Image (tube, rainbow, N blue to C red):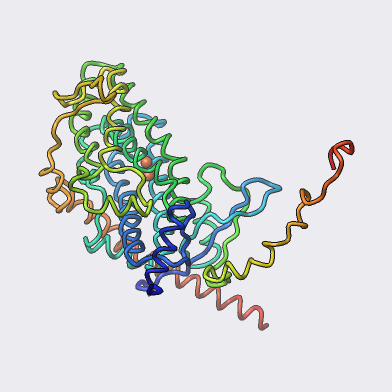
Amino acid sequence: MSPQINLEEQFQAKIDAEIKIEPKDWMPDAYRKTLIRQISQHAHSEIVGMLPEGNWLTRAPSLKRKATLLAKVQDEAGHGLYLYSAVETLGISRLQTIEDLLSGKAKYSSIFNYPTLTWADMGAIGWLVDGAAIMNQVPLCRTSYGPYARAMVRVCKEESFHQRQGYEIMMTLMNGSAEQKEMAQDAMNRWWWPAIMMFGPTDSESSNTEQSVKWKIKRHTNDELRQKFIDATVPQAEYIGLTIPDKDLKWNEAKGAYDFGAINWDEFWNVVKGNGPCNKQRLEARQNAHNNGAWVREAASAYAEKRAKRSVTAEVA
Amino acid sequence: MQQQDWPLWEIFIRSRQGLDHKHVGSLHAADAQMAIENARDVYTRRMEGVSIWAVESKYIHASNPDEAGAFFEPAEDKVYRHPTFYDIPEAIGHM
Ligand SMILES: [Fe+2]
Ligand SMILES: [Fe+2]
């Protein structure tokens, strides 16, 4: 037996025994690469995900809503940082990770390439988009890589408020005027399908799932999570009088779950490939923020250097 | 200058007076003061902390996980270090 095979077997045995993998432990290259890709994509999604909601910060309908939205957007920045911190433990520099986003090499969740046209979109995003994210993230709290799991525990603790504030916005609109109801339904119509696409391609098309499940990076397949999300969300929509824009949606008594209509995968892949309504705008916003912040980073470095020198002089004197 | 990462800092938070500081993650900052201020914004948005330590990551020395077996082995066969190793009559009650 070659030493390499032996190491891989020991590694898999640890995974099977639910022993977490920590940064300095031996791990197969492919495990490391999969994690770098997945965690950095996740981090980028949190960061880019601030943009669609940022669009409404200055136009929130009340001070309370504004404070809430600001707090939520700040949380997403924090989530991005927890995850960047986790990905860095895998031996890739923070600068490189960010560079990969800015150059367009790295991906982020396609949902954030859709525009936020009305205030009701803040409700739909919190409720549906964060709701779908929670469905994905809760099992990730038990993922096999320690730093990723710990970051996810922190993220999940904060997500619940995001979903609840979104649902509350929708509920308020649905208790309002005819126009407000229409606005909420319109947001529902636009966000429903992109939200259920957030779980990724269907299992038969998802090439990485099997290995990721074996390594316990993932604990459920895309389709399992999508089904769970739909089953949880339909009654919430009904409760406030919103219609799910899917004429094939129907409770299936035998399977104890909802049947739903065909997903437009052409649209999904089109947005992944960069042709969604806002792909260009989102990337440009990140690039501008980075470039326009360069002088701040330089000034902070210069200030830190000056202070370090001064404290050395003080010690000598 | 901008092409260089700021140093990495490990962040430790005391959640309540009387408890230990606990490692929560890391962040980049130009200096210690910035590390502490950023740690406040990243890790204590919901009153998770009353005190923050920031330690530049390069000053952390760690035991080698590949040698963990041998390194921690001396403690493995010393059951007599645990209270349950000693039989005390029931009649004595809690001891
Ligand atoms: Fe988040
Ligand atoms: Fe969120």
Quadrant of the drawing holding the N terminus of chain A? bottom left
> In this view of the protein, which residue sits in the foreground, A90 or B90?
B90
Looking at this view, name the residue that lies furthest to the left: A266
Relative placement, left or right, of A232 versus B73 is: left
At x 41%, y 55%, the residue is: A81
Q: Is residue A58 visible?
A: no
Q: Which quarter holds ligand 2?
A: top left
Seen in the picture, residue A113 relative to B69 is either above or below; the reply is above
Relative placement, left or right, of A109 versus B42 is: left
Give the percent coordinates (x, y) of residue A44: 31, 54
Relative placement, left or right, of A134 versus A114 is: right
Give the percent coordinates (x, y) of residue A124: 28, 32
Give the percent coordinates (x, y) of residue B61: 58, 71
> In this view of the protein, which residue sits in the foreground, A274 or A36?
A36
At x 52%, y 70%, the residue is: B66
* Res A111 → quadrant: top left
Quadrant of the drawing holding the C terminus of chain A? bottom right
> In this view of the protein, which residue sits in the foreground, B31 or A134?
A134
Seen in the picture, residue A94 relative to A221 is either above or below; the reply is below
Mark count = 0
Q: Is residue A190 visible?
A: yes
> In this view of the protein, which residue sits in the foreground, A177 or A221?
A221
Looking at this view, name the residue that lies furthest to the bottom: A316
At x 25%, y 16%, the residue is: A177
